[in-house]
Amino acid sequence: MTESVRQAGDVSPEQRMTEWDGDHAVTVVDEEPPGIDPGELDDEDLFRELHSLHRTRLDTLRHASDSALATHLRRTAELETEYLARNPGREVDPSRLRDGS
């Protein structure tokens, strides 16, 4: 496999991602900082960040570059995981359940 690297100065490991371009691994550098650790956000900021990501989800899916989409997916997963860890007994709306669930 051939690996090509695009660097933007000194970057942290969190800012490097590997994507597949056909048969080749391509290391790309995420130009955006990885964001604040979700564990450091208070509940209000965590929910605000989640709201922002969900609001921009479709536009990112349809129109963003592959690396921007990967960053969006990674950040969404980080924030949602933190939300679920803080709210293990979250209220489930019965109208959102399938019959028999």
Image (cartoon, helix red, strand yellow):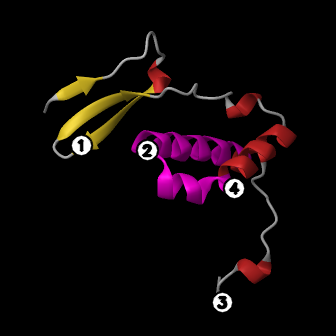
Three-letter residue code for mark 2:
Ser
Residue 3 image point, x, y percent: 20, 27
Is residue 1 in the magenta section? no
Residue 41 image point, x, y percent: 78, 32
Find disc 3 in the rendering and name its residue: 99
Is residue 59 in the magenta section? yes
Which mark is first along the chain, 2 or 3? Answer: 2
Among the 4 quarters of the image, the one containing residue 32: top right
Which mark is first along the chain, 1 or 4? Answer: 1
Residue 55 is labelled as 4
| The N terminus lies in quadrant | top left
Give the magenta range.
54-83
Among the 4 quarters of the image, the one containing residue 45: top right
SS at circle 2: loop
Q: Is residue 3 left or right of residue 75?
A: left
- Mark 3–mark 4 distance (CA, rounded to whole Å): 29 Å
Which mark is first along the chain, 3 or 1? Answer: 1
Residue 21 is labelled as 1
Residue 91 image point, x, y percent: 82, 65
Tell me: residue 5, above or below residue 44.
Answer: above
SS at circle 3: loop
Find disc 2 in the rendering and name its residue: 65
For discs 3 and 2, the disc positioned in front in the rendered view: 2
Three-letter residue code for mark 1:
Asp
**CB within 8 Å, label 3 to label 4:** no
Which mark is first along the chain, 2 or 1? Answer: 1
- Mark 2–mark 4 distance (CA, rounded to whole Å): 18 Å
The residue located at (64%, 52%) in the rendering is 56
Which mark is first along the chain, 4 or 2? Answer: 4
